[in-house]
Image (spheres, rainbow, N blue to C red):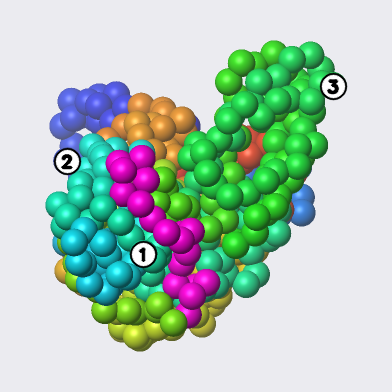
């Protein structure tokens, strides 16, 4: 990258006495500098495209001026490609604009039936309200002791015996936790966790292992939470120093298996699996806590999915818990690229605006939102809210257009913009774009799955011009870090030359 020192060019000219000659020379030099600048940008892109790692790759690139919407650099900008988690920019834009930054989710606890002399002739009901973050470590202080508070609320009613059981009403959303075309290999792992009417602990099960020498079978020491209800067959091996372990299971399953390798000689290595039935887990945990507190429960825990006659039953509410505001949840989505939260938001949009808490309903609402914003959707193929589906496809022009229209028309653009991580500092950008030229100038969302690398967001050029960029790369050879280096070079030149 060339850095032009203008004073070294112009100062000798200013000492000359002929103003006409001076103006001609300045005009020529400015033209030369502009030409060199354009060539520099072109060369960075050409260098990337001509690299051997890009021999079979597809690249879609669009950089536009945020003030005018005019494209300053484009390459195959209308080509629809797999974009991975950059899809979250679409979902969170719709969520923040349609639901508002102060939107919250409510989980409540109550009972059905009547209480006589400390005996509840009915059930205790946990009613899910679609909260994506209930019990999450990301909001640990917010949810601290929430289930103990539920126990206290039950005790304050005077109940010391429940003739029925603890039931989680998980009917807020549908009973299809994952989009139909997600890969089977993703479903058992934490990033492939499904969406339920009541989700809990990020729908994540931590499996703790201890391992020894190469080739040995690591031992499962314990799980968090302890009573997930799933039995795992362990086919892991100890090998090397990296995590190559994968969990296979599916929603509502009680069996699963673990394959691959985890590092040798570790005393507490954690694999994160997806919980297969979070609503039932919540009912089971509250049952255990109430029994420990001395309250007798006659029957075993259940969910409304298991007992259709209990769906939407009228309850006497004794406790409620409101989630953090949506802007905080969206910041977590875009900083840490949380698939679960994004899929929750998609279903919530469908629930609120289409009266149907399904993935397809949410996609319908999101598509209408994009149309209303003036975003071209004909090249957008949306199959979920997070970008985990291999059938998702966006193009860089469409993404850039979305970001432009959010800046121009979005009622809650400030919250949307602030939800994006800063280059080289936090979130999924903490380890990329670390050159000083990016400092304080770039906020963006990243996307990564196998042979896919994408980025989209906002940057400020050294001229002060505000810019928008989107780049998607599919089917490259070699390491993703090498692709990122090329992307950094293109963005660096755009910052210095626009």
The image position of residue 337, as x and y in percent, is 44, 49
Residue at horizontal 63 percent and vertical 49 percent from the top:
230
Residue 401 is one of the magenta-drawn residues: no
In front of the other: 129 or 345? 129
The residue identified by callout 2 is 19
- Nearer to us of marks 1 and 2 is 1
In front of the other: 485 or 180? 180
Single out the residue that lies furthest toward the right.
215
The residue identified by callout 1 is 163
Task: Decide which of tag 3 and tag 2 comes sooner along the chain.
Answer: 2
Task: Decide which of tag 1 and tag 2 comes sooner along the chain.
Answer: 2
Question: Can you tell which mark lies on residue 215?
Answer: 3
Quote the CA–CA distance across marks 1 and 2: 99 Å
The image position of residue 441, as x and y in percent, is 29, 40
Question: Can you tell which mark lies on residue 21?
Answer: none
Tell me the magenta residue range: 291-308
Residue 306 is one of the magenta-drawn residues: yes
Residue at horizontal 59 percent and vertical 44 percent from the top:
273
Horizontal side of 190 relative to 64 (left or right) equals right
Quote the CA–CA distance across marks 3 and 1: 52 Å
């Amino acid at each position: 990258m060339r850095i032009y020192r203008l004073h070294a060019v112009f100062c000798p000219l200013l000492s000359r006495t002929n103003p006409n000659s001076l103006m001609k020379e300045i005009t020529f030099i400015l033209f030369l500098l502009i030409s060199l600048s354009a060539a520099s940008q072109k060369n960075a892109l050409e260098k990337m495209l001509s690299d051997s790692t890009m021999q079979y790759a597809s690249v879609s690139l669009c950089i536009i001026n945020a003030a005018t919407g005019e494209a300053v650099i484009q390459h195959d900008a209308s080509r629809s490609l797999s974009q991975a988690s950059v899809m979250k920019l679409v979902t969170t834009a719709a969520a923040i604009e349609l639901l508002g930054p102060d939107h919250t989710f409510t989980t409540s606890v109550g009972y059905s039936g009547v209480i006589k002399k400390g005996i509840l002739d009915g059930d205790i009901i946990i009613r899910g309200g679609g909260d994506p973050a209930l019990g999450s470590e990301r909001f640990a202080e917010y949810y601290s002791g929430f289930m103990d508070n539920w126990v206290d609320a039950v005790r304050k009613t005077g109940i010391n015996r429940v003739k029925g059981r603890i039931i989680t009403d998980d009917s807020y959303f549908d009973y299809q936790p994952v989009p139909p075309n997600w890969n089977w290999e993703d479903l058992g792992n934490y990033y492939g966790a499904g969406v339920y009417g009541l989700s809990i602990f990020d729908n994540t099960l931590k499996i703790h292992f201890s391992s020894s020498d190469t080739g040995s079978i690591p031992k499962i020491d314990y799980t968090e939470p302890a009573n997930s209800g799933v039995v795992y067959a362990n086919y892991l091996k100890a090998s090397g120093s990296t995590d190559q372990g994968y969990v296979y299971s599916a929603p509502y399953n009680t069996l699963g298996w673990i394959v691959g390798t985890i590092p040798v000689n570790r005393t507490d290595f954690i694999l994160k699996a997806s919980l297969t039935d979070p609503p039932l887990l919540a009912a089971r945990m509250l049952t255990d806590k109430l029994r420990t507190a001395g309250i007798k429960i006659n029957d075993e825990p259940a969910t409304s999915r298991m007992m259709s006659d209990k769906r939407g039953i009228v309850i006497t509410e004794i406790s409620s818990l409101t989630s953090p505001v949506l802007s905080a949840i969206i910041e977590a989505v875009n900083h840490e690229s949380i698939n679960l939260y994004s899929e929750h938001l998609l279903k919530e949009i469908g629930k609120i605006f289409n009266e149907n808490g399904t993935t397809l309903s949410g996609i319908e609402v999101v598509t209408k939102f994009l149309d209303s914003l003036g975003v071209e959707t004909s090249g957008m193929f949306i199959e979920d809210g997070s970008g985990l589906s291999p059938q998702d496809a966006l193009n860089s022009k469409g993404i850039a257009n979305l970001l432009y229209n959010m800046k121009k028309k979005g009622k809650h653009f400030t919250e949307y913009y602030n939800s994006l991580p800063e280059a080289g500092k936090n979130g999924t950008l903490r380890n990329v774009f670390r050159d000083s030229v990016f400092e304080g100038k770039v906020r963006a969302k990243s996307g990564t799955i196998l042979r896919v690398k994408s980025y989209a967001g906002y940057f400020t050029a050294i001229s002060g011009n505000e810019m928008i960029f989107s780049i998607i790369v599919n089917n490259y050879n070699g390491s993703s870090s090498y692709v990122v280096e090329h992307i950094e070079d293109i963005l660096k030149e755009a910052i210095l030359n626009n």
